[in-house]
Amino acid sequence: MTKLGVSWSVNFDQYFAAHFEAKEGLPSVDEATWYRLINLCWPAALKGWDGKWDAHRAELLSLVCAAPYRSCESTDALMQRYAAGLLGAALGCQVTFEGDRPEAVTSVVRSVAAEEFGEQLRAEGVMERAWPWVLRAIGRVPFGVGQVHAPIVAGSPSLALAPLRLHGARVTYGENTKFKLACRYTAADGSDATFNGLATVSVAVRDVDLRGIFWADASKRLPAQPLPKPRDAEGREADIWLCVPGAEPLATDAKGLAFILITQPREDTVAFTPSEAASVKGHRVISLWVGKDPIGSLNLRAKPPMAELRFYDGAD
């Protein structure tokens, strides 16, 4: 965070680069807390801020470090406090062995629940109890993981996504300008549905290292280079998916929320036949964003997406 303050005083472009680097390193931090963190690192007086961030070290640490779990009165209160962080870790943390992920992500909260409240939880149970709290909070702030490291592949089970039974359709776009991203997807009834993805798709792409969407590039202070599909630094294209949960009661909790998943072909597609590698079976999630459409052009209740892509194993 200190880099943000230093960069501001040196170069505006460096500041924005540091801004997005810090955002990627602090997944699931709500916007109010995020801007308080920025203010505490600001190097100069501005709008009431005295610029002496070192004098506010204790306040900075109180924001970065959550209060002790003993202040929670129940397992529900514990889950409410740490839900976003648990899901962010389940999706974004890197582990030496993938089989260690459930234990690495949930062992502490399960231990606290057992010792403090006498509740025995499974890793899968922790994820099930975390999602409702995150979905309820999205009315105030979106949830996102800009760099998904868990190997989540279409059509296969996932620790973090399993409770949702997500399914959705591919999003394509035409007009790609500063003020509009004209998106299209196939609805569940087979019809075409359109919406302005400026406040949803563009935001999701902004949070991952991809180029090609005008608004996302511009928000990073990069030269806008509109492309038919977003691409990474190596020129590999990415696909955008609009999804909704199929599991109740989470599907009800998520009414009106857009799940934007971004995928790329798996690196081990050499193990697939050419047709399989080109199909959705070969797609791996690289980013996830969940939020509302403040523009109001996306009507998921009237036009839910077709189940072209599923992030769970087995039939309905």
Image: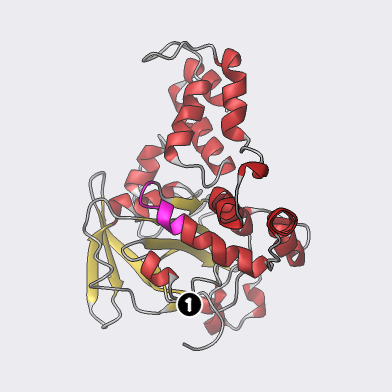
**In terms of image quadrants, where is residue 70?**
top right
> Which is more toward the observer, 18 or 316?
316
Residue shown at 49%/71% (left/top)? 164
Q: Quadrant of residue 244?
A: bottom left
Which residue is pictured at 55% across the width and 43% down the height?
24
Pointer 1 local density, CA inside 10 Å: few below 14, some 14–19, many at least 20: many
90 left or right of 315?
right
Quadrant containing the N terminus in the rendered view: top right
Res. 59 image quadrant: top right
Q: Position of residue 158 (x, y in %)?
A: 60, 71
Asked whether residue 268 is drawn in magenta, I would say no
Q: Residue at x 40, y 71 (%)?
A: 251
Q: Position of residue 149 (x, y in %)?
A: 63, 58
Residues in magenta, as a range: 134-140
Q: Is residue 196 above or below residue 178?
A: below
- Using the image, determine if residue 196 lies above or below residue 160: above
Circle 1: residue type? Arg
- Residue at mark 1: 310
Place of residue 273 in the rendered image (x, y in percent of width and height, measured from the top left): 60, 84
Q: Residue furthest bottom?
A: 315
> Residue 272: horizontal and vertical position, in percent?
62, 81
The scheme the figure's colours follow is: secondary structure
Q: Is residue 93 visible?
A: yes
Residue 160 sits above or below residue 44 on the image = below
Taking 193 as reference, is 212 left or right? right
Left or right: 95 in relation to 211: right
The local secondary structure at tag 1 comes to strand
